[in-house]
Image: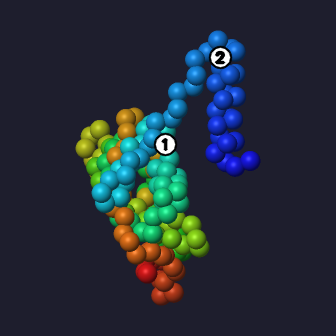
Amino acid sequence: MNRFLLSILALGASLLAHAAAGQSAPKPAAPKYVRTPTGFLLVLRQGDNVLQELEQLTTREKIPGASLAGIGFGHPTFGFWNAQTKTYDPKAFRDVEMASLTGSIAWKDNKPALHLHGVAADKTFATVGGHILSLEVGTGSMEITVTVHQQRQIREIDARNGATVMSW
């Protein structure tokens, strides 16, 4: 059986189960992105994993490379690159407003490779920022514009410093 037919059968079974239990049908999940003339607009909600959503979009839509910009509420973990250990020193923050989110999407080992930076402000308007290691949407939402590039972008290790850098 093809995937489409299996999906229809599964949906029908779910609707029948809900009807038999006297429940209304489950509400389908709202789409998290729409296509724009230059790429995509994502609107993510509380609890969404931003990096995971971007990786899924990149794979699903076969994005060769992109630049992105965004804003919203979140729980980021920033990392500062330690050139001696060639790792990131992490620091997590909760309930901040992402005043700026910027980055790029490329490919490494046939998987999406994200490179994001951001600036976040707390309720006292104190700001922090840096390389984003993880980011969950906090109260409210996060809006991210992805501008797609036609040429495939790749990431590879720069032998001089051990950092992963973009090329094509």
What residue is drawn where x is 25% and y is 44%? 125
Residue placed most toward the observer, 106 or 125 = 106
Disc on res. 5: none
What residue is drawn where x is 43% and y is 58%? 132
The correct choice, above or below, for 32 with respect to 128 in the image is above
Name the N-terminal-most of marks 1 and 2. Answer: 2
Residue placed most toward the observer, 31 or 104 = 31
Q: Is residue 102 in view? A: no
Q: Is residue 8 left or right of residue 40?
A: right
Image x and y of residue 162, in percent? 51, 80
Q: How many tags in the picture?
A: 2
Disc on res. 48: 1
**Badge 2: how crowded within 10 Å, few (<14), some, or many (20+)?**
few
Tag 1: residue type? Asp
Where is mark 2, residue-wise? Answer: 19
The correct choice, above or below, for 94 with respect to 54 in the image is above
Query: Can you tell which quarter of the image residue 116 is in?
Result: bottom left
Q: Is residue 139 in view? A: yes
Determine whether the residue tagged by mark 1 lies in a helix, strand or loop.
loop
What residue is drawn where x is 36% and y is 69%? 149
Q: For marks 1 and 2, give the CA distance.
A: 30 Å
Mark 1 or mark 2: which is in front?
2
Quarter that holds the C terminus: bottom left
Name the image colouring: rainbow
Image x and y of residue 30, in percent? 46, 36
Image x and y of residue 44, in percent? 42, 42
